[in-house]
Image (tube, coloured by chain):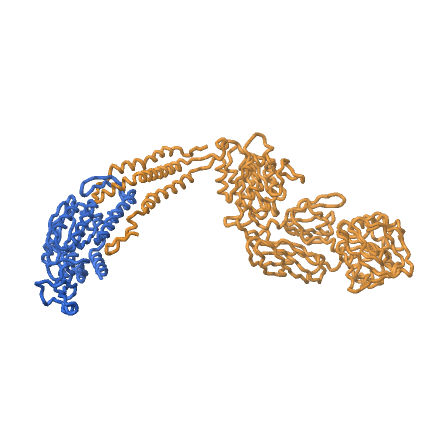
Amino acid sequence: MSEGIAAFLNPAQMAKLNRLALNSRYVVEGTLAGRHRSAQKGASTEFADHRSYMPGDDLKRIDWKVLGRTDKYFIRRYQDETNLRVYLLVDRSGSMGYSSSPDLPSKFKYACTLAAAVSYVVLKARDAVGMCIYGEKLDVSLPCKNSFNELNNTLKILQGYKPAKGTAGADVMHQIAESINRRAMIIIISDLLDDQPEIIKALAHFRKNLHDVIVLHTLDPVELNLDLKRGAEFEDMENGERLIADPRSLAKEYKDLMGEFVDKYRKACAEMKVDYRLVKTDEPIDTFVRAYLEERKRMSR
Amino acid sequence: MLVFANPAFLWALTAAAIPLMLHMFQRRRTVVTPFPTLRFLKAAQKRSSSRVRFENILLWLLRTLLLLMLCLAFAMPVIRTTSAGSWLSRTRRDVAIVIDASYSMNYELDRGKVWEICKDAAAAVIEGLLPGDRVCVYLAAETPIPVIEKPTTEHATVVQAIRALTCLPGTSKIDEAVATAIAALEQQEGRREREVYVMTDGQSLPWHGFRDAEKHDETVNSEGRPVITREQRDAVTFFALLAGAKAPENVWPSDVKISPLIMLSGQTARLNVRIGRSGSAKQITVGVEIGGQERGRRSVTPDADSETDVEFVVNGLEPGIHIARITTPNDALPEDDEFLCLLRVRKQLPALIVGPQNATRYLKAALAPGAADDGVRQVDTAELDSVDLRDYQAVFLCDVFPLSGQAVIRIEEYAQNGGVVIVFPGDRAEIPAYADMEILPAPPTAVESIPVELSARPLRRIANLSGQVVNFNMSLPPGTVPTVALKRVLRLGAMRENAAVLITAGDDTPMLSGRAVGRGRVFMFTVSAERDWSTFPLTAFFLPVAHQLIRQGAGASVQPPHVVLNTQPLVNEVIPEYREDEIIATPSGNQLAMRDAGNRVYVIDSLSEPGVYTRVRAGAETPEPVMAANADRTESRLIPLAPAEIEEWTSFKKLFFANDPEELTKLVDEYRNGRSLAEICLWLALLLALLEWWFANRALRKQTGASEKLVVDLAGKVVTQ
């Protein structure tokens, strides 16, 4: 059985993802020099602004032309460039174990593969990627590293996890938001089937800390359309509650509710400038990632 | 009243509980399925509970009804058409069957002749009767023909009689046959259900009697023909089988006109043939055969449902009687594809001149200039009794009065039967001698001498008065002003009935008068045929006038080239030179039935056989054609009758009509036994099944919700529409 990234992506998929890049829409704070705009002023060639000279400043930075015109000392400041730190939050709550068909992966399996694909793209751009796995609690939090070996180790850990019984998504998100103290990119891969206002608050928490947040709302097609033919006794995958229902007769109302649920997240994310994407598990991972990143690149120009 | 033909299947109605049981059973055997969004399912169930309940109830109703309908169909519910339906199925019946015998019933359909179809249908109706039911059969022809006059219970005999029936060549009047049949039913004792069945091809013409009849209460109309009363229309159940073609096609020769009416050997004659067409416009070929030899063939394209004239020129016919046969191409109704007529060609028009030599000299010299001309014969007055006047087309009486009473009677009879009598006065006769001749246009009153100074008179033709002397014309050359010199002239009294002055000499002196007598003509000159009275015999127009008189008179008396069947014509009008001792043979070789209507007038009783009638003269070996009879072709114009017209025209209260025997059998069965609802139940079941399928599989799944408004692109971007 293959391990690490090979367990999730085959060479053909990796080849498709090779030339892609994940760019942040906001300034980030990295630890290394990179190609992403930093909040700091630094040593790049891109002029940022002027600042009054203060004792201790390097004389090389005094803008002599401004001194000649104004007889005042000003320091030229340049935009700092740093690397991107990407944190992947993978949900392994009970509901993520759902798969409507043997032909489709479970949402958790899909989320893991998606996390692997995004990590691969991030590392190829020499940025750093970290990962948080949570279910009923924060199971593991791995810091950002920019090494494929580290990624393989991270994915091996991820491979060892299975969906949990319950969920505590909102709390975990708050916890993670508190723990990441520098601006980074947060990618949440989850079905978001939790207390919706709390989840939205958690997302707002990330934004408050100036993180660039991407929500990849992962859902099974049946969850969206309730395209089931036979009546059954349905059991909730997280709290064990049961309900006898005929899906065909409930389809209309169910779809209405599901539509409202998705739309509420979509609107909330739009207000908070969180990039919200709905991912269906019947969609090929590489196709989605490629389409998404290309669109993001287009929008950042 | 609803009864079940197969009530054992009513037990199956308990199957209606199956959907409910299945529903309940299914609920208990649900499979547990893990599902992540149960909260939405619960909310959806809460929100849609009333709608789901309604849909479930509706589905349950549909399924239950479907099973009920299927069970009912197998149980075969039967609803009586009347409240007394069950009584009807047990009651005795008197049934009258009227079969349309008009020749249009010979129309050939894909499944056989309409006539045979109708006979089979009639037999089927009889075979469906119960023992004890009485039945009578009538043929609808020009007049109703009883086949089984009184209702009988011997059904096998009736069927046998129907099988032996043949179609007649004429048209039919269904209303009279139905009235006669109903009258026959009403003469039976006991109160029974009465049914009348009319088997017809559904052409409009035979039903016109219904349309034109007044709906009154008498059983006969003012012409003595049977009619159907209001009470009968209400009481009798009327079934009509309209078995004919719905869009019939037919071509037929309907009439022939021959010009001139009298054909002389060597003359050219024209045959104007009228062709009728039912159906769409189509090119056809019309042929004429004379004496078995084809004499002409023309192509015409009659318009749809119209009549067209076609003209044929015939010449080179020998003296004698020739049979002309006009034919149209064979079609679905071959009975009217042939039309017969007789062409009577004469060598010349024979004339008899009676009178002394001196009085007839000029006339004979004018009519028969050659001594060998056997067409004109001159006899003395005394020889008149020994001459058979019927051998001559015209008889000239020149100074013959007084005549014996026998001679007067013979001349009058000759004129009545179509002969032409031309009278010239003379010196022999006194005025009273004319008194016995009552056929003269006017009684002579005196002989008047004309002074020399007044003798020259121009001749003037007086226009004919309608209905008097037909078609008389002097035919003088244009610009001619004929003048005669009168010496003596016969003065006439008041003109008799159907008489008129035709030529005057001067303004007020009648020169020639004429009178229609029977089928013949009597002409009288007021001057003699020799030159003692006038210069008329010496004038250039003496001969043309004499010829005109012979020909015009002969034209009036000529027999028609063809006669119409089912009429009762006078023998003398249709058969030339008929003698009492002659036997006229029908086309099939039988003797033609005639009756003496008195005063030597004979009437043909029933002219029912189309074809050429013949006679064998004494001494002759071969029969001579005397008359060609054709059916009245109005029946050939095939116009299908609409059921609504039957309803409107017949006004029967209980009226059923069918287009084929199977439909008739079904109608009769429904009327007698009630109407089965099994088929309706099956159709309803099918409808319910379709409705259930649509509702369960389509209607519920086609509902659109908010999620249909969400569009997710490849990049996961959600757009609401």
Q: Quadrant of residue B426?
A: bottom right
- Chain B, colour shown: orange
Camera-side residue of B94 and B652: B652
Residue B535's place in the image compared with B70, above or below, is below
Chain letter for the part of the structure drawn in blue:
A
Residue A70 at x, y percent in the picture: 16, 67
**Dividing the picture into quarters, in which one does residue B280 lie?**
bottom right
Whole-percent x and y of residue A77?
14, 64
Q: Where is residue B481 in the image (x, y as percent from the top left)?
A: 82, 63
Is any atom of residue A113 visible in this view?
Answer: no
Q: Is residue B611 left or right of residue B121?
A: right
Q: Which of B637 and B410 is in front in this view?
A: B637
Is B37 situated above or below B448? above
Q: Position of residue B150 (x, y in %)?
A: 59, 35
Q: In this view, does B77 lie to the left or right of A271?
A: right
Q: In screen coordinates, is B524 left or right of B75?
A: right
Q: Nearer the viewer, residue A105 or A254?
A: A254
Q: Decide which of A237, B637 is in the foreground and name it.
A: A237
